[in-house]
């Protein structure tokens, strides 16, 4: 399925599923444990645990960048950051829905992506993750899309409030 049909299906799924606050869905401990490991790997600065949580056909849709398709391409991106530091703070899971072998999360957070030694530049953003349960029962990230709360022309002017780690 191409990206456009995937987005159409995603839109239909998001509209058809009932709302549930993330705090209302603790009945999926294996999914929650996977999500916790995903974000812990970001905080640790180690891409390898995060790469292990990717589906083979993962789609990554970064903010202000081109779409990456497949685990190999996304893995190169995660590993290729050199001396850059990527961290998140104040993440809030706004929504979590599970339907059969598919789940999605909607998150809001601040992120920084800066060179090691430079001060963090925190930016407000949000993402949608689509998780797919494997035949083994393990959850893998199938789609990751995020974007800024700030228009592109104002991105560099965005406040650096919360510059502390």
Image: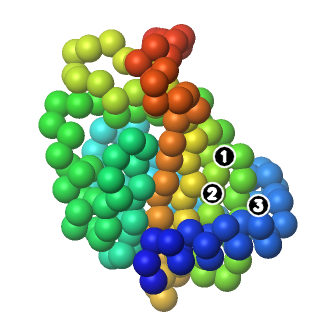
Disc 3, SS:
loop
Disc 2, SS:
strand
Q: In the image as oriented, which residue stretches furthest toward the bottom?
A: 135
117 left or right of 88 in image:
left
Q: How far apart are marks 2 and 3 (CA)?
A: 11 Å
Q: Which mark is residue 93?
A: 1
State the residue at coordinates (83%, 60%): 19
Q: Where does residue 2 sit, x and y in percent of width and height?
A: 43, 78
Compared to 62, does 114 lie above or below?
A: above
Compared to 148, does 34 lie above or below?
A: below
Q: Earlier in the sequence, mark 2 or mark 3?
A: 3
Q: Are marks 1 and 2 in contact (CB under 8 Å)?
A: yes
Q: Can residue 110 be seen in this snapshot?
A: no
Q: Which of 55 and 45 is in front in this view?
A: 55
Q: Quadrant of the N terminus?
A: bottom left
State the residue at coordinates (20%, 49%): 79
Q: Which residue in the protein does label 2 denote? A: 105
Q: Which residue in the protein does label 3 denote? A: 25
Compared to 72, does 109 lie above or below?
A: above
Q: Which of marks 1 and 2 is nearer the N terminus?
A: 1
Q: Within 10 angstroms of label 3, few (less than 14), some, or many (20 or more) residues?
A: some
Q: Where does residue 139 sit, x and y in percent of width and height?
A: 50, 72
Q: Distance between the residues labelled 1 and 3?
A: 11 Å
Disc 1, SS:
strand
Q: Where does residue 76 sit, x and y in percent of width and height?
A: 19, 56
Q: Which of 88 and 15 is in front in this view?
A: 15
């Amino acid at each position: 399925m191409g990206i456009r049909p995937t987005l159409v299906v995603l839109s239909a799924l998001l509209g058809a599923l009932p709302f549930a606050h993330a705090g209302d869905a603790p009945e999926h401990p294996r999914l929650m444990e996977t999500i916790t490991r995903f974000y812990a790997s970001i905080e640790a600065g180690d891409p390898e645990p995060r790469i292990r949580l990717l589906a083979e056909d993962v789609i990554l849709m970064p903010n202000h960048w081109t779409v990456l398709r497949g685990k190999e391409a996304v893995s190169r991106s995660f590993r290729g950051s050199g001396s850059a530091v990527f961290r998140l703070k104040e993440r809030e899971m706004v929504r979590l829905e599970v339907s059969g072998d598919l789940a999605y999360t909607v998150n809001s957070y601040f992120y920084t992506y800066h060179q090691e030694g430079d001060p963090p530049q925190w930016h407000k953003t949000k993402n949608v993750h689509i998780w797919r349960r494997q035949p083994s029962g393990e959850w893998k990230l199938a789609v990751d899309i995020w974007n800024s709360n700030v228009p592109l022309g104002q991105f560099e002017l965005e406040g650096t409030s919360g510059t502390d780690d």
